[in-house]
Image: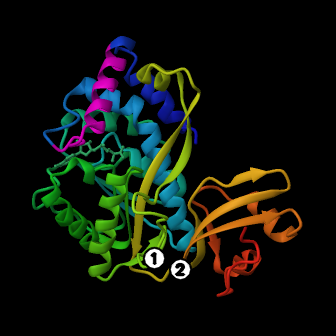
């Protein structure tokens, strides 16, 4: 994924006055906070202009990629559904909205809830560059989202990379409130770590208990873990700009962002037959797939001889869905072990 040009240019302009050395030091300090056992739950992880800029330079491209991937799934599960309004809770510099307006350019109204003034200031400045009128004119509210916050309902309600920053006893309340504010779909994204996945599972259970339909990545009842230390997560490749490389003190031109997510809706969704839960392994004359299905994990070897299935594997990525009307290609509708199984 590449950042939209107006955002890339906006970041370069907003961060031009910050020395590369300060940016890199602040990014490293933030990274250490996020990797610590408490992961930013003890006090604000981002406080002040330098940290807000460091977050935007070193994390925002990756969180936009993860949010965009989750939104793509929502779009595919709810064909024809077009959200007009967005609520983003724990907005940071506006990552979710930048991803959402690319996916649904028809968005008309956006409300952001964020506690840190420096994030709001930076997010507002970046938003002025968006081609989306909804993002340029978004409402930014300074709010502590662990309190009794109020918000008008939105078609799409999102929280990205926030649960892990909250005290554990406040997370359920946030998820409940998010759902109360949702007219169409809610999306919750967290880092693709065992802890991030655990937060997403609890969030999914809370949503389901409130009557939400879990539309992605898989129904809660599907057994998708291969062993007790496994966790369901996905990955998206993010191009690194020069600014991004500076902030990370890195030379590679890309990075892989691992994320876990859950999407829930008040609407009926297009069901799936399976989801690709590991990077497809492309070998000479065959492709190895690891799929999660309602019966559990299936390992398939799709040979070039299975022409239709093999052709379909060309478009499959880690995280892709296999639609119900494609199940026959991979023998997923059979109750007996797959003929492709090694
Ligand atoms: C890791 S950042 C994620 C930002 C953005 N959602 C993204 O995906 O890039 C977490 C954000 O949540 C905000 N946050 C954390 N606790 C909060 C609270 N109690 N009330 C409001 N915002 C909070 C932080 O200030 C920060 O901007």
Q: State which quarter of the image contains the N terminus.
A: top right
Secondary structure that dominates the magenta span = helix
**Magenta span:** 22-41
**Classed neighbour count for the residue bearing mark 2: other residues with Cα under 10 Å, few (<14), some (14–19), many (≥20):** some
Give the x, y percent position of residue 331.
72, 79
Image point (74%, 64%), residue name: 301
Give the x, y percent position of residue 55.
34, 32
Q: Quadrant of residue 263?
A: bottom left
Asked if residue 64 lies left or right of residue 308, the reply is left
Image quarter for ligand 1: top left
Mark 2 element type = loop
Q: Would you say residue 26 sits in the magenta stretch?
A: yes
* Nearest to N terminus: mark 2 or mark 1: 1
Please name whichever residue, 62 or 342, is drawn nearer the observer in this view of the structure: 342
Q: Which residue is mark 1?
A: 219
Mark 1 element type = loop
Q: Decide if residue 3 is in sight here.
A: yes
Asked if residue 32 lies left or right of residue 173, the reply is right
Label disc, if present, on residue 294 of the rendered structure: 2
Mark 2 touches mark 1? (CB < 8 Å): yes
Give the x, y percent position of residue 150.
16, 63
């Amino acid at each position: 994924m590449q950042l939209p040009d107006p955002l890339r240019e906006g970041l370069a302009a907003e961060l031009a006055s910050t020395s590369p050395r300060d940016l890199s030091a602040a990014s490293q300090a933030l990274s250490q906070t996020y990797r610590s056992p408490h992961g930013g739950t003890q006090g604000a992880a981002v406080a002040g202009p330098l940290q807000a800029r460091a977050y935007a330079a070193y994390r925002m491209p990756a969180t936009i990629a993860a949010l965009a991937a989750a939104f793509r799934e929502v779009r595919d599960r709810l064909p024809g559904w077009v959200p007009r309004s967005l609520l983003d809770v724990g907005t940071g510099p506006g990552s979710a909205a930048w991803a959402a307006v690319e996916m649904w350019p028809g968005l008309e109204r956006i409300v952001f809830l964020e506690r840190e003034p420096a994030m709001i200031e930076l997010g507002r400045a970046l938003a002025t560059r968006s081609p989306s009128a909804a993002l340029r004119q978004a409402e930014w509210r300074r709010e502590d989202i662990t309190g009794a916050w109020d918000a008008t309902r939105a078609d799409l309600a999102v929280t990205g990379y926030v649960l892990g920053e909250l005290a554990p006893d406040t997370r359920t309340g946030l998820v409940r409130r998010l759902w109360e504010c949702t007219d169409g779909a809610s999306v919750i994204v967290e880092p693709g770590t065992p802890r991030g996945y655990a937060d997403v599972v609890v969030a999914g259970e809370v949503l389901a208990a409130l009557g939400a339909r879990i539309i992605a990545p898989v129904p809660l009842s599907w057994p998708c873990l291969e062993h007790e230390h496994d966790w369901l997560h996905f990955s998206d490749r993010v191009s690194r700009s020069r600014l991004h490389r500076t902030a990370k003190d890195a030379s590679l031109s890309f990075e892989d962002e691992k994320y876990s997510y859950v999407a829930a809706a008040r609407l009926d969704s297009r069901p799936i037959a399976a989801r690709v839960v590991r990077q497809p392994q492309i070998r000479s004359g065959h492709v190895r797939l690891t799929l999660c299905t309602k019966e559990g994990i299936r390992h398939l070897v799709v040979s070039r001889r299975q022409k239709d299935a093999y052709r379909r594997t060309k478009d499959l990525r880690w995280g892709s869905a296999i639609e119900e009307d494609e199940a026959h290609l991979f023998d997923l509708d059979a109750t007996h072990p797959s003929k492709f199984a090694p």
